[in-house]
Image (cartoon, grey):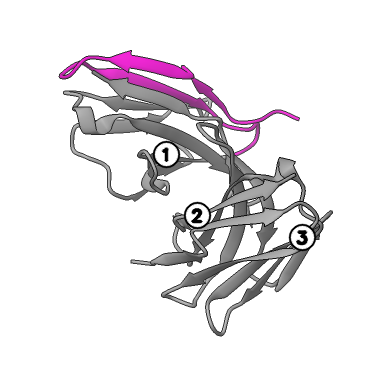
Amino acid sequence: KQEVTQIPAALSVPEGENLVLNCSFTDSAIYNLQWFRQDPGKGLTSLLLIQSSQREQTSGRLNASLDKSSGRSTLYIAASQPGDSATYLCAGANTGNQFYFGTGTSLTVIP
Amino acid sequence: AAGVIQSPRHLIKEKRETATLKCYPIPRHDTVYWYQQGPGQDPQFLISFYEKMQSDKGSIPDRFSAQQFSDYHSELNMSSLELGDSALYFCASSNQGVGWAGGYTFGSGTRLTVV
């Protein structure tokens, strides 16, 4: 079974800082990878999807990359804002039909 | 744009009761997935359906069953509820017909509380 680890588990930064969230997979044969945001008690909002033929995706202040050789992904958030405070989850799929989720990074951006 | 619709949003049941959760996928999505997220935990895959057939099975208890109907909506039936079943239940959909180009789209979830 795929195991997904996210580091750090929690992060607190002042507004305006750039930050990096990390995600690693025990099985590096990742087919698709998706980053999600989850606000407390709420659903999952998809942020970025990296498909099998891709290595990187960007959306606004967010950039996600995937190194398939090592089974690691990073989510880069530029110029962080208080509204970015949430839990960030990465999820990866092998060739099977399900995503495996990481345990999440709880981000707090301090005004 | 249409999203994945889940109902109800909240549900309170007593132990040993039965609950039914519904999921309506994005139009033209042919695959539905169910996930369970316990307090402070990451989502765990339960079961998925492709074209109304079960396609994959995860850590779904025998007390739970699910199906996908002809209009592609899906229902998760949970019987003999236990306190430990209290969780946020997510449904996601995708279109396998075009590969995973769109990834998953998740619904807002149903929060089940068993008392």
Does A61 sit above or below residue B111?
below
Q: Which residue lies furthest to the right in this view?
A: A60
Q: Do the residues labelled 3 and 2 touch (CB within 8 Å)?
A: no
Residue A40's spot in the image, x, y percent?
Answer: 53, 35
Amino acid type of the residue tagged 2 in the rendering: Gly
Residue A92's spot in the image, x, y percent?
Answer: 52, 62
Asked whether the residues under marks 1 and 2 belong to the same chain, the reply is: no
Q: Quadrant of the C terminus of chain B?
A: top left
Q: Quick check: can you spot residue A81?
A: yes
Label 1 and label 2: CA atoms lie apart by: 19 Å
The chain letter for the residue carrying disc 2 is A
The chain letter for the residue carrying disc 3 is A
Label 3 and label 1: CA atoms lie apart by: 36 Å
Categorize mark 2 by other alpha carbons within 10 Å: few (<14), some (14-19), many (20+). Answer: many
Amino acid type of the residue tagged 1 in the rendering: Trp
Q: Residue at x 37, y 48 (%)?
A: B44
Secondary structure at badge 2 equals loop
The residue stretch that appears in magenta: B1-29
Secondary structure at badge 3 equals loop
**Disc 2: which residue:** A104
* Nearest-to-viewer mark from 3 and 1: 3
**Disc 3: which residue:** A17
Amino acid type of the residue tagged 3 in the rendering: Glu
Res. B34 mark: 1
Q: Quick check: can you spot residue B101?
A: no
